[in-house]
Image (cartoon, helix red, strand yellow):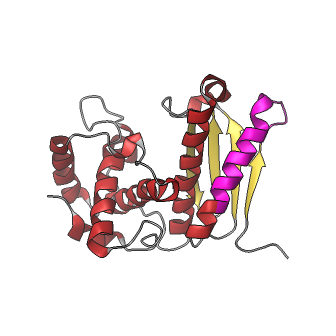
């Protein structure tokens, strides 16, 4: 019978789009999966990786999403692997950590549908990147100045329980002149960091914590 807690990597490469990076990609992602599995209460997860430069962060050459507890989709730009292999693979490893934390949270309370729930889910995933890698958080978790962070937090308080908050607006800066790019990630990371300090727990231990409890750790 299949292992109910196994993670499996699937490289989509029928046309050879991944080129000679296949071995690097497999080693990087599988080692990150194993490390995340040792820290998180993960179900069985299928991790699907493919070349698609249109869906990556230009800063890292990779991008991902996790629509449920059992699946992760990772898009990569193989050209970035050729330009700076070490940086590309480190970014990919951190992305795997981020997305698998989402899977673990999906298996508990879920990602959520409100702004507050999304902030907590993304903030904890950013904090887990730092926990798993033992380094700084991702750049999108520290994209705001203290003044910007305080302003964004005040705006979030009034929308905390709203499901019509506009995900792209909050997390991608979809409207120029409105919220800064990565505002949601930076605020979520600040809330997750404050909660971790308040409780003495790591992101891996807070993976199923209710989003409402993070309001107690708000910075303002």
Residue shown at 60%/34% (left/top)?
86
Q: Which residue does the image show at 73% across and 67% down from the upper left? A: 6
Q: What is the quadrant of the N terminus in the image?
A: bottom right
Front in this rendered view, residue 19 or 107: 19
Describe residue 192's horizontal placement relative to residue 22 as left or right. left
From this view, report whether residue 57 is shown above or below residue 163: above
In the rendered structure, which segment of residues is drawn in magenta?
A: 12-34
Residue at the image point whose x is 69% and y is 68% from the top: 44
Majority SS type along the magenta span: helix
> Magenta span has 159?
no
In the image, taking residue 81 as reference, residue 203 lies left or right, namely left
Task: Name the quadrant containing residue 2.
Answer: bottom right
| Image coordinates for residue 77, horizontal then vertical, percent | 63, 30
Q: Would you identify the image quadrant in which residue 42 lies? A: bottom right
Quick one: 100 or 205, which is closer to the camera?
Answer: 205
Residue 45 screen position, x and y as percent: 68, 62
Q: What residue is rendered at 48% in x and 31% in y?
A: 59
Above or below, comparing residue 208 to residue 188 in the picture:
below
Q: Is residue 26 magenta?
A: yes
Q: Nearer the viewer, residue 73 or 25?
A: 25
The answer to whether one can see residue 17 in this image is no
Q: Is residue 217 visible?
A: yes
Residue 50: where, in percent of width, then height? 70, 39
Q: Give whichever of 139, 150 is nearer the camera.
A: 139
The C terminus - image quarter: bottom left
């Amino acid at each position: 019978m299949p292992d109910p807690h196994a993670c499996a990597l699937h490289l989509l490469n029928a046309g050879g789009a991944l080129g000679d990076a296949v071995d690097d990609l497999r080693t990087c992602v599988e080692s990150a999966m194993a490390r995340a599995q040792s820290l998180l209460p993960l179900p069985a997860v299928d991790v699907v990786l493919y070349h698609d430069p249109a869906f990556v962060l230009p800063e890292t050459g990779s991008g991902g999403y996790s629509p449920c507890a059992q699946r992760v989709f990772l898009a990569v730009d193989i050209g970035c692997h050729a330009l700076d292999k070490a940086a590309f693979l480190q970014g990919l490893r951190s992305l795997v950590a981020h997305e698998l934390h989402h899977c673990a949270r999906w298996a508990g309370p879920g990602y959520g549908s409100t702004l507050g729930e999304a902030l907590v889910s993304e903030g904890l995933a950013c904090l887990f990147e730092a926990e798993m890698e033992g380094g700084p958080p991702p750049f999108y978790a520290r994209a705001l100045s203290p003044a910007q962070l305080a302003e964004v937090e005040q705006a979030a308080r009034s929308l905390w329980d709203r499901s019509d908050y506009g995900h792209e607006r909050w997390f991608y800066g979809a409207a120029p002149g409105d919220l800064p790019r990565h505002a949601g990630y930076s605020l979520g990371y600040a809330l997750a960091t404050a909660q971790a300090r308040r409780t003495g727990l790591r992101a891996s231990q807070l993976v199923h914590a209710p989003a409402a409890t993070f309001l107690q750790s708000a910075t303002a």
